[in-house]
Image: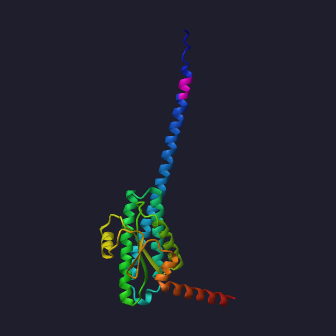
């Protein structure tokens, strides 16, 4: 039986082509992973600067008189922006990313500081802030949490004076755990606290507006002011 000679050139050529394809895939994977990490680091740097800015605002507000505290909604808006950046970074890098978790703990502390500041302002200036405290989970055990987050984001955009404090129920931070203990939060997420009362399960915009009738009053006042301004311009 005649044996055909082995065509080594064919095998070498196939090996080279395979090596090139494999090497290119590894290079592209490393390139896109590095690009993703660079984008996340950029977001982290921006968040860190925003947090420092917010902390400076805390100091300014604490030393202000009641007459100077008319526009505290700017800080609430800034906190909302920070949360959106963190949510984006968390989705990009995953919930278990160490850097994101560190920033999330820092942001949660910032929220609690703002909450305590608002309590001080409430006592000092006899002003009761419109507040929602929200507990959620990112561990795939809360199918309605993401939907509830969108509702609260929309409400915060519609009512700049509304302060929404969002906390990850499973965050490894003693201060958040103390907050959970104080409010006696049950692991039936999502849950929003309005005027100290818990509302478990998904709450629509209508549900929350019903629980905070001041929001409807605020909406009507804003609408009336906008109409009056438009009439004057005409």
The answer to whether residue 110 is visible is yes
Which quarter of the figure has residue 53?
bottom left
Above or below — where is 57 with respect to 14? below
Which secondary structure type mostly characterizes the magenta part of the structure?
helix
Along the horizontal axis of the image, is 234 left or right of 152?
right
Along the horizontal axis of the image, is 226 left or right of 185?
right
Q: Quadrant of the N terminus?
A: top right
Along the horizontal axis of the image, is 200 left or right of 13?
left
Along the horizontal axis of the image, is 10 left or right of 47?
right
The residue stretch that appears in magenta: 10-14
Q: Quadrant of the C terminus?
A: bottom right
Residue 104 at what x, y percent from top left? 39, 65
Which residue is at a point 56% across and 22% down the rendered structure image? 9
**Residue closest to the eye, 14 or 206:** 206
Residue 178 at what x, y percent from top left? 30, 72
- Asked if residue 208 is among those painted magenta in the image, a careful observer would answer no
The answer to whether residue 75 is visible is no
Which residue is at a point 59% across and 86% down the rendered structure image? 223
- Asked if residue 12 is among those painted magenta in the image, a careful observer would answer yes
Which quarter of the figure has residue 198?
bottom left
């Amino acid at each position: 039986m005649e044996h055909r000679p082995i065509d080594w050139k064919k095998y070498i050529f196939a090996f080279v082509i395979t090596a090139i394809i494999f090497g290119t895939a590894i290079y592209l994977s490393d390139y896109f992973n590095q690009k993703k990490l660079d984008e996340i680091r950029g977001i982290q740097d921006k968040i860190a600067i925003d947090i420092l800015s917010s902390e400076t605002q805390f100091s300014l507000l604490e030393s202000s008189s009641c007459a100077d505290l008319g526009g505290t909604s700017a800080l609430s808006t800034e906190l909302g922006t920070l949360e959106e950046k963190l949510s984006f970074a968390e989705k990009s890098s995953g919930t278990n990313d160490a850097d994101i978790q560190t920033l999330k703990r820092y942001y949660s502390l910032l929220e609690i500081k703002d909450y305590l500041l608002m309590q001080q302002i409430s006592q000092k200036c006899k002003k009761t802030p419109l507040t929602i405290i929200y507990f959620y989970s990112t561990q795939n055990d809360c199918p309605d949490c993401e939907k509830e987050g969108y509702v609260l984001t929309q409400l915060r955009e519609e009512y700049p004076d509304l302060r929404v404090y969002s906390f990850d129920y499973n965050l490894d931070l003693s201060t958040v755990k103390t907050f959970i203990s104080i409010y006696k939060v049950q692991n039936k997420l999502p849950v929003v606290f309005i005027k100290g009362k818990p509302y478990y399960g998904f709450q629509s915009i209508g549900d929350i507006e019903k629980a905070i009738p001041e929001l409807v009053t605020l909406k009507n006042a804003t609408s009336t002011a906008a109409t009056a301004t438009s009439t004057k311009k005409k």
